[in-house]
Structures are given as structure tokens and as C-alpha cells.
Image (spheres, coloured by chain):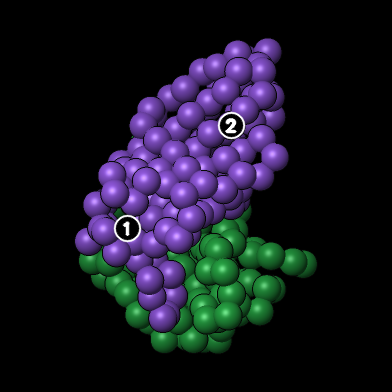
Amino acid sequence: ETGVTQTPRHLVMGMTNKKSLKCEQHLGHNAMYWYKQSAKKPLELMFVYNFKEQTENNSVPSRFSPECPNSSHLFLHLHTLQPEDSALYLCASSQVQGGAGELFFGEGSRLTVL
Amino acid sequence: GENVEQHPSTLSVQEGDSAVIKCTYSDSASNYFPWYKQELGKRPQLIIDIRSNVGEKKDQRIAVTLNKTAKHFSLHITETQPEDSAVYFCAASAPSGSARQLTFGSGTQLTVLP
């Protein structure tokens, strides 16, 4: 497996459920990101982890909880979501310091909240 | 913070014609401007980028121009082909010693008609 992989690819959940999205990068990068992609809107940066430390939380509601146990894995824990949270959630990674800074994206997890 | 505006939102061209997508940014400190292509159901992928120390960069049929004074940059695709049909996103970010934080435009749906 190479690049950035995300699981699950599709997820349907009720507003009272708890689920998690998983991301794994096989590129040796040291920064990982969660982006939200909604129809007709720009990609929205949610969380940034640099060397496993969270460096940004762009005013994301607390019902989204990130976890980065090491530089290769990133999780997004979901609980008590709202229908407007339905979107494609993209994980990305990049190499900070010494790399070009290019973001490599995963295929995304398509989330539907009923 | 940075604000990136992208136009047009949709663009249809005949195969073989050229396509131009324009973006403006607000933060004069921004120095990195990538363009991503996202085919239907696929991940965004970097197709070309430019840094503020150059005004133009070309890679085969794709070119990007940057006007720092006016704070705008453009993507040019020549001799378009049906496989160029996709959503194109511009982005901008300022210098950072840590993880790169891209601000994306809202995307342009390019359709190349055979």
C-alpha cells in the first residue's frame, strides 16, 4: 500500500452514533491534515498535526475529535453529528522542512448523517 | 487570514481549445500557489505549483502565471483533451516553518467537449 489511505470510504450514521475515520500515510511525511469537502464550497481545513502535535484547530465543533498517535496515523472521531456534517472528509499529508510542502490527499471518506 | 477567490465556477471548452482559470488572494505574505485537479470520485492531485520568486511556470500543456502586485494567479491549459475534464482548485499559503496551511478556492468544473 502506498500513498495516503482512508477508511471507511463510505459511512452512514445517525445523529446519536459514534464512529471514527482512519487515515494512514505511507510516504514518511511528518504532517497530517483533515479537510472537509462540501458541495459548492472550498476545501475547509479542519485540523493540522505537525510531528504528531496538533498545531491548528480551525474553529471545528467539538463533535469532531482528532487523534494522531504517530506521524503515520490520523483519526477523526465523530459523535452526535448533525445532518449538515454530511460531506467528504479528506486526509492529507506533507513533508515539513526539507520537502516541497506538497499535500498528498487520500481518496476521502464520504459521510452521510441521517 | 487568507482569502482565495476563484473564477469561473464552471467552464466548458471545445477539445483542442485553451482553458484559463483565475484566482485572487488577499494575504500579501502568501508565497506558494498550487493547483489541484480532482476527477469525479477521486482525490485532489497536485498538477502544478508556483512560488512567488517566479512569474510563470510551464509543464507541457499546463502553465501557471503569477502577478504578485495584483495578487492574482492563473492556470492555463492548452490543447485541451476530454481527460482534462475535472474540478480544478487553486490554493495559497504563506511561509511557515511548520505544516503548510493551504487556503483553497471554491473550484472550477472544467468540461472539455469532444
Of A63 and A42, which appears nearest the observer?
A: A42
Q: Residue at x 47, y 22 (%)?
A: B11
Of B99 and A34, which appears nearest the observer?
A: B99
Q: Residue at x 32, y 58 (%)?
A: A81
What is the number of the mark on residue B35?
none
| Pointer 2 chain | B
Q: Please state the horizontal and vertical placement of residue B24, each as a whole percent of the image.
A: 31, 43
Vertical position of residue B60 compared to residue B78: above or below: below
Residue type at the position of mark 2? Ile
Which quadrant of the figure has residue B1? bottom left
Q: Please state the horizontal and vertical placement of residue B32, each as a whole percent of the image.
A: 44, 60
Q: Please give left or right for residue A63 compared with residue A97 in the image.
A: left
Q: Please state the horizontal and vertical placement of residue A27, each as a whole percent of the image.
A: 68, 73
Residue type at the position of mark 1? Leu
Q: Nearer the viewer, mark 2 or mark 1?
A: 2
Of A66 and B107, which appears nearest the observer?
A: B107
Q: Residue at x 51, y 47 (%)?
A: B56
Q: In whole angstroms, how far apart are the C-alphas of marks 2 and 1?
A: 41 Å
Q: State the residue position of label 2.
A: B77
Which one of the lettered chains is coloured purple? Answer: B
Colour of chain A, in one word, is green
Q: State the residue position of label 1.
A: A81
Q: Please give left or right for residue A95 compared with residue A61 in the image.
A: right
Quadrant occupied by the N terminus of chain A? bottom right
Can residue A41 be spotted in the picture? no
| Pointer 1 chain | A
Q: Please state the horizontal and vertical placement of residue A30, each as a whole percent of the image.
A: 55, 81
